[in-house]
Image (cartoon, rainbow, N blue to C red):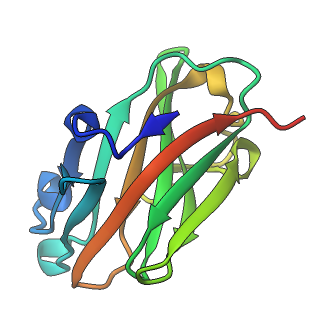
Amino acid sequence: MIDFTQPNEHQYWTTVNDDVMGGISTGKFSYDGSISQFTGELSLANNGGFSSVNRLLPPLSNDINAVNLSYIGDGRTYQLRFTTWKDGYRINYKHEFETIKGQQQSKTFYFNDFKAVFRGRLLSGAPELVAQDIKQMGLLIADKTPLPFVLKIHSVEFLNFK
């Protein structure tokens, strides 16, 4: 389990915004004194429109097939993402989720429901997401709404459903 109420958890996360492609969106992962949060503002200028944060994960047990995310959102749509490296190839997998402004929510995501993507486009023929291949997890917002965003994360728990 990853506990985002711990003061040092946000330090494991790195930010990748659309400025890597010329955009001017902002985003960061920080600790507000009680919880870690993904905050920033999207901009559509210069063909921008996304902000993301990610962290490396320790090896996961082969029997894990789902993840539960506990969060408080702002009414916007986000993506939970996992990155794999297998046979020299890096593949990103995404699953979108809706938030309700100011309401604590908990959602379980099954690995077989994640979609392989490359720069926002679905990949066909990619292998299914399996725990032993996951090296990194992340959060992304790219809802084409040029406004500030806030997603507070309470916990991430990796699960085994038989």
In this figure, what is the number of numbered marks? 0
Q: Quadrant of residue 14?
A: top left
Among all residues in the image, which is located at the extreme right? Answer: 162
Tell me which residue sits at (44%, 59%) in the image.
120
Tell me which residue sits at (53%, 56%) in the image.
70
Left/right placement of residue 50 relative to residue 135 reads: left
Q: Of 16 and 68, which appears nearest the observer?
A: 68
In the rendered view, tell whether residue 11 sits above or below residue 139: above
Residue 117's spot in the image, x, y percent?
Answer: 52, 50
Left/right placement of residue 56 relative to residue 33 reads: right
Q: Of 40 and 43, which appears nearest the observer?
A: 40
Q: Quadrant of residue 4?
A: top left
| Quadrant showing the C terminus | top right
In the rendered view, tell whether residue 155 sits above or below residue 91: below
Q: Is residue 154 visible?
A: yes
Residue 2's spot in the image, x, y percent?
Answer: 45, 36
Residue 16's spot in the image, x, y percent?
Answer: 21, 49
Residue 96's spot in the image, x, y percent?
Answer: 55, 65
Q: Is residue 119 visible?
A: no
Q: Of 115 and 141, which appears nearest the observer?
A: 141
Tell me which residue sits at (36%, 70%) in the image.
142
In the rendered view, tell whether residue 103 sits above or below residue 4: below
Left/right placement of residue 130 relative to residue 1 reads: right
